[in-house]
Amino acid sequence: MNQKSEIWIKKYLPKKTSEVIGQQKQIEKIKKYVENYKKGNKAIFLYGGQGNGKTSSIYALAEEDNYELIELNASDTRNKEAIETILGGASKQMSLFGTNKLILVDEIEGISGMKDRGAIQNIIKIVKESNFPIVIIGHDAHHDKVKALKKESELIEYTQLTPEETMQILNTICKIEKIECEEKTLKQLARISGGDARAAINDLQTISAGKQKIEMKDIEEISDRQSTQKIEEALKIIFKTTNPEIALNAYNNVAEDLDKIFLWVEENIPKEYMDPKTMNNAFDALSLADVFYGRIRRWQYYRFYVYCYQLLSVGIALSKKEKNTKETQYKTTSRLLKIWIYNNANAKKKGIAQKIAQKTHTSQKEAFHNTVPFIQAIFKKNKEETNKISKYLDLTDEEIVWLKTK
């Protein structure tokens, strides 16, 4: 594999903590915690925006000080039994390699819904009993869903990288890859990333493909991310062309996120492609794009975004041998509307269920399906109990009205 085909966000992961840019004070606190850890100590909770070095700091520390790193991604592990299997044993048993051990729980936001199965409480139990230091990583340590876990953790905030700090990372990569780039161009690329070094590195790799020199004009398309274009116009380009170069740029100025682009394409393929073979080819391209998107969500292989957009543009466009000359009225997927109607109709019910779950120490799912209907029946018949329950659950006037009338 040549240098340009490697994924740079992995290739340029810091090997030493001194290579992590902009977070040295935070790293010193982590080192002190790890070195002085004793059973019963709190966990460390690293939080802050994307691409600022939280996870890479722990990788670098483990490699630098020869720790066996045991990692669990909360987005992939969905129940307390799996957490106990992976973390429970690891937190008590000595390393097989005779080294110290460091336990990492990454993407704690992935625990959304997991508390219904006791995941948070199980992590807290493991933290209290662990023989080894535990580091938890998330974007927001103050979110309600990790409130209980926050009490058992020492919080360390990773700050957003400045354009100068991001530029320092990009400049190092340019030197290694022998890419010539003017300072103002690199500074603009750093500014666009908004403090996300991972996004900046991905952008640098994308625009430098096949080049040894980057100029300001090369990042104009990235600079225009905020400009908008109707998704219908992009679909018309893709469905009506057989030229891959034209199709490739169709989504450049579309404001819709990738989730919605998937739904738009899925909805309109049958409207545009009437030939069964063409339709089958298009859905194959859509399916493969979804495979890459799944890998992005599970493993953070952000370079795969390129493949997603290529398949959703060029892949769909080249599914046909010739274009459909008839005018097609492209429409948004009905699934979006149905999801919105369902969520809107159940918003108050979910809010009430959340309050019940917190007070009764049950899952929100159980409260949603079983307890809320029972309370509705009480509110419609018993004023005295209604007042007591409303006060206990701290219900709003709107929530009380909803329980009485729905």
Image (tube, rainbow, N blue to C red):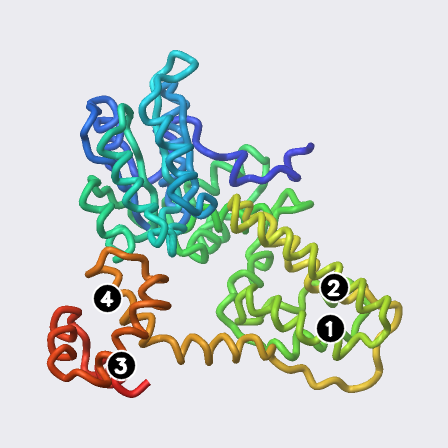
User: Residue visible at 44% across and 27% down?
Assistant: 15
Q: Is residue 234 left or right of residue 168?
A: right
The CA distance from mark 3 to mark 2 is 44 Å
The amino acid marked with disc number 3 is Leu
Which residue is disc 3 drawn over?
A: 403
Could you say where residue 214 lies in the image, as x and y percent from the top left?
59, 49
Q: Nearer the viewer, mark 1 or mark 3?
A: 3
CA neighbours of label 2 inside 10 A, class few (<14), some (14 to 19), many (20+): many
Which residue is disc 2 drawn over?
A: 283
N-term-proximal mark, 1 vs 2: 1
The amino acid marked with disc number 4 is Lys
User: Residue visible at 66% across and 79% down?
Assistant: 233
* Extreme-front residue of the structure: 381
Which residue is disc 1 drawn over?
A: 269
Q: Say above or below: 14 vs 141.
A: above
> In which image quadrant can residue 405 be found?
bottom left
CB of mark 1 within 8 Å of CB of mark 2?
yes
**Could you tell me which secondary element the residue under label 1 belongs to?**
helix
- Residue 355 numbered mark, or none: 4
CA neighbours of label 1 inside 10 A, class few (<14), some (14 to 19), many (20+): many
**Could you tell me which secondary element the residue under label 2 belongs to?**
helix
Q: Nearer the viewer, mark 2 or mark 4?
A: 4
The CA distance from mark 1 to mark 3 is 43 Å
For the residue pair 320 and 179, the one nearer the viewer reads as 320
N-term-proximal mark, 3 vs 2: 2
N-term-proximal mark, 4 vs 3: 4
